[in-house]
Image (cartoon, rainbow, N blue to C red):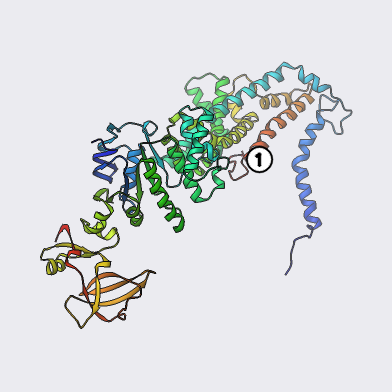
Amino acid sequence: MTFAVSFQKVSRHFGSVRAVDAVDLDIVPGEFFAMLGPSGSGKTTCLRLIAGFEQPTAGSISIFGERAEGVPPYRRNVNTVFQDYALFPHLNVLDNVAYGLMVKGVGRPERQKAAEEALALVRLPGYGARRPGQLSGGQRQRVALARALVNQPKVLLLDEPLGALDLKLRENMQEELKSLQKALGITFVFVTHDQGEALSMADRVAVFNDGKIMQIGTPEDIYQRPKTRFVADFVGSSNVLPPDFVQRYAGQHRWGSLRPESIRIGRAAKGDGVAARLVSTNYLGATIRLALDAEGLRLHAIVPAGAALPREGEAVVLTFNREHLHLMDELG
Amino acid sequence: MRSDRGQSAPIGLKLAATGGLLFLHLPILLIFVYAFTTEEKSFVWPPPGLTTQWFAITWNRPDVWQALSLSVRVAAISTAIALVLGTLCAAAVSRTKFFGRETISLLVILPIALPGIITGIALRSAFALAEIPFSFWTIVLGHATFCVVVVYNNAVARFRRTSGSMIEASMDLGADGFQTFRHVVLPNIATALLAGGMLAFALSFDEVIVTTFTAGQQQTVPIWMLEELIRPRQRPVTNVVAMVVVLVTLLPILAAYYLTRDGDQIAGSGK
């Protein structure tokens, strides 16, 4: 099978800093692939390696079967939506979008027609005559998207494209990006530090930390079955349980994770379970987040709003289904 | 509580300001007046009579044309060299980080901070040491040292304001290095270069000190004027040429000022 993007033991070092460290990665054609991780985890460097702005220190990269090392950005059939959009301030919106076709030598009427179509695709028809400076952040983002799509790339790279937008706009754009990707069938590679964004949009997610990929899988895999403490903690703030604790409930001495919504809260008097004390409650709208202290271990639970709750400081008993306790690869 | 708004300044302040401005600009006006005097051996006030004959005489003096042509050629070529080197240097300093970057930045700006006489002597002894005969090109080299600074300062300020990802975006969209420069970099720094170039041209055109040290027998306009003042013959010709010089240098500086007043400072314009 030919992968859209394939990394074989790719490293990118800056001096003594290992920004990307021996990464193996295969991205399937037509998938929406998210690279998730905290800042400095190497996800953006991976994106720049695909775009051609960085060259690997070691390893090999291929894009649709072709070796990419040494190929300059302008000879790759890959386009990028930049974090700061990087629109050209001296050109109007139409010329910005038509830029890629202009440098390829496509005639003016033809490239303007293509640019108009791309603008219509991102729901900005008729904005061609404006200057980037006259647009709002969300509109600039759409122009940047149209400008990248007009070249009909095989892979579209998106570098935290929603980071600068406000919440409402961001949610709209998430849906739009997702349906745009479905309609066009182009491989999208999306870099983000927002786990919610990655889970809701991507077909598969790679979780980065310290220049390495911690886990690759579907959003459900990553969320329900984290392989390491880092993934469990970073993706959706799971409760990370130490080996001694897990030993008691699952009989195996290894790290475990338990999703906050899997924990049930009971009165201290009845039944067995984990004895704990309610430390604080946090109202989140549809749900309430509880902080609990179980024998010195800080746990979080999420319960539906409106449920009868003990008072803060009160002793409670925590119960959960054994199958919800996920055992991670990390041993004690 | 008192407010100065709407009140006119005290009479003493007005007088002082007027006096200061007159002190600065009357001599220039005087030069213009002497261009029309009938007395040719010495400058006498008031002029014994007025005439426009000196314009015709100036027009027919080959030495004036030689000096003027030399000055224009020197200024044009120094400016061209400065535009290329200054832009490249500004691009390197503002786009990349490397060892000694700040030092290079300082060294580039130094020639305009140094007195012209130091630059002049340094260049003269360097030329003598390398046994380079004084020529048109030694003048150009001398002038290029300070022209580069002006262009560099303007370009560096503009580069700092343009986003680096724009260049990456251009490459990403399929433009090679040349196309990126032509379609993205140049349009973004064009007005800064125009302003820097005009200023460099004006600086070169009226430069005396460095020229004195780097010229051989050739005379640029300012050198020609100095020589001319010693000779008691057709003196008002000098004044006619002075008028031309004022116009040729003032207009570019004004243009440079208007092109960049939206934020860029024209560093080095005080030389």
Residue farthest toward the left in the current orientation of the protein: A251
Quadrant location of the N terminus of chain A in the rendered image: top left
Give above or below for A44 relative to B249: below
Question: Residue visible at 33% across and 53% down?
Answer: A198
The residue closer to the viewer here, B89 or A21, is: A21
The residue closer to the viewer here, A110 or A130, is: A110
How many labels, in total? 1
Question: Residue visible at 79% across and 53% down?
Answer: B14
Rendering coords of residue B179 (x, y %): 47, 29
The residue closer to the viewer here, A176 or A328, is: A176
The residue closer to the viewer here, A96 or B234, is: A96
Q: Splitting the image into 4 quarters, where does residue B194 fall?
A: top right
Q: Is residue B164 visible?
A: no
Left or right, residue A158 beside residue A68: right
Residue farthest toward the front in the current orientation of the protein: A183
Rendering coords of residue B126 (x, y %): 49, 26
Give above or below for A147 relative to A273: above
Q: Splitting the image into 4 quarters, where does residue A185 fall?
A: top left
Q: Splitting the image into 4 quarters, where does residue A64 fall?
A: top left
Quadrant location of the C terminus of chain A in the rendered image: bottom left
Question: Residue visible at 51% across and 23% down?
Answer: B127
- Chain letter of the residue carrying label 1: B
Q: Is residue B206 visible?
A: yes
Rendering coords of residue A305 (x, y %): 35, 73
Q: Which residue is mark 1?
A: B258
Rendering coords of residue B207 (x, y %): 63, 30
Left or right, residue B207 beside residue A110: right
Helix, strand or loop at disc 1? helix
Report the amino acid beneath label 1: Tyr
Left or right, residue A50 beside residue B195: left
Neighbourhood count class around disc 1 (C-alpha, 10 Å): few under 14, some 14–19, many 20 upward: few
